[in-house]
Amino acid sequence: MERPGSTAEERPAVDVTHRTAGAPAARRAADPLAGYHAADFPWYGLDEGWTGRRWLGQVGTGQRTAADGDRAPDYGTLGHGDEPARGPEPRDARRFAVVVTVARRDVRRSADNTGTLEATSASSAAWLAGSGLLAATWPGNLDRALRQNWLDQQSALAWDLADDLEGPAWSSLTLPVNGLPQPFRYRESEHGWVLAGEAPGVLIGAYGRSVSAYGVGFTTVADLGAYDGR
């Protein structure tokens, strides 16, 4: 992978700016699942071992579909536990785990047709999970300017780590995917944990805090309606 801020020809496999894919705004407002239903890959969430709250995250856009010109999702998130804080909190006691599903994509043209995007890989999932954890856990005592500096610095570090999944910062962790053991790469930080690996048809990333990564399992989501936030 290339560093953030590279040229169009060198952009990473997925845009880490979280945007809702596909449907126009009015249709999305009427159906929050529209972006998810536009995907050409299965969505993954935590398996039945998770008995807590489930909620929709965000969907990231990618290539255009030939059928209607909308942009098909390349990745998206499904949340478990407490949703991200809306503002600084003096003591953040949230407990959550977020699963990032990334489509398997070959090298392709960028959405603006000015360059190419690299093929997706487990590093793509690791980067999205790492950046998601940072966005969810930024220090509440930082003002806006310092927060941006902190995010830039930490994002660059997360990028380097995602690009070296076999490096010493990562360890091996085996977790069930649809009931079968699957190897993942895993790391912890003061902000929480991040993991990345593969699953049938997709790549999986995940991040969380105050939820043990060693106790989670993943499964294809048969009913997205279960992620209604209740």
Image (cartoon, helix red, strand yellow):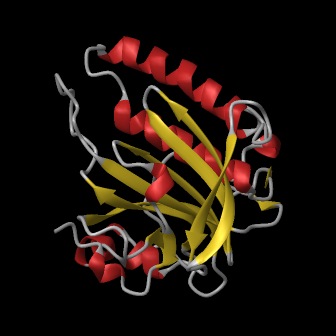
Q: Is residue 50 above or below residue 159?
A: below
Residue drawn at (29%, 64%), measured in percent from left and top? 55
Residue drawn at (81%, 66%), measured in percent from left and top? 106
Q: Is residue 60 visible?
A: no
Residue drawn at (29%, 13%), measured in percent from left and top? 143
| Residue sitting nearer the eye, 210 or 35 | 210
On the image, which quarter does residue 77 sit in? bottom left
Q: Is residue 102 visible?
A: yes
- Measured as percent of width and height from the top left, residue 225 is found at 29, 81
> How many badges with numbers are in the image?
0
Q: Quadrant of the C terminus?
A: bottom left
| Residue sitting nearer the eye, 160 or 74 | 160
Residue drawn at (42%, 49%), measured in percent from left and top? 212
| Residue sitting nearer the eye, 70 or 47 | 47
- Measured as percent of width and height from the top left, residue 192 is found at 44, 36
Left or right of residue 108, residue 93 in this image: left
Left or right of residue 178, residue 105 in this image: right
Q: Is residue 139 above or below residue 99?
A: above
- Measured as percent of width and height from the top left, residue 207 is found at 47, 47
Q: Is residue 70 above or below residue 194?
A: below
Left or right of residue 107, residue 211 in this image: left
- Measured as percent of width and height from the top left, residue 215 is found at 45, 58
Q: Quadrant of the N terminus?
A: top right
